[in-house]
Image (cartoon, rainbow, N blue to C red):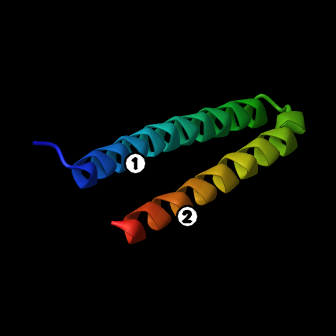
Amino acid sequence: MITPDDHHREHQLTIFVALILFSLLLILIQMWLCFGVVENLIAGKPAMAIPAAVVSLICFCVQLWMFIGIARIDRQV
């Protein structure tokens, strides 16, 4: 029989997996930005470096916020 505590843990596990998958997506976006900037720098077009750095910083902040959320979920268990 499923207890409310089991249901709560299952819900937390679902949230944890979703955050990990979203974090993976953000890492892939950052890698794509990095490769795009390097490709443009090789082509002699440095104009994309600053906007890509800003977007990468935003992705990093979102990942940090999610890590804090994961740590909070882990403390509750």
Q: Is 64 placed left or right of 4 in the picture?
A: right
Task: Assess disc 2: are there few (<14), some (14-19) or many (≥20) residues with their C-alpha within 10 Å of its C-alpha.
Answer: few
| Residue 48, above or below 20 | above
Q: Amino acid at mark 2?
A: Ile
User: Camera-side residue: 47 or 65?
Assistant: 65
The quadrant of the image that shows the N terminus is top left
| Residue 39, above or below 71 | above
Q: Residue furthest left?
A: 1
According to the image, label 2 marks what residue? 68
User: Camera-side residue: 33 or 61?
Assistant: 61
Look at 40% across and 48% down and name the residue there: 16
* Cα–Cα span, label 1 and label 2: 12 Å
User: Camera-side residue: 49 or 3?
Assistant: 3
**Rendering quarter of residue 36:** top right
Look at 36% across and 44% down and name the residue there: 11
Sequence-first tag of 1 and 2: 1
According to the image, label 1 marks what residue? 16
| Residue 37, above or below 59 | above
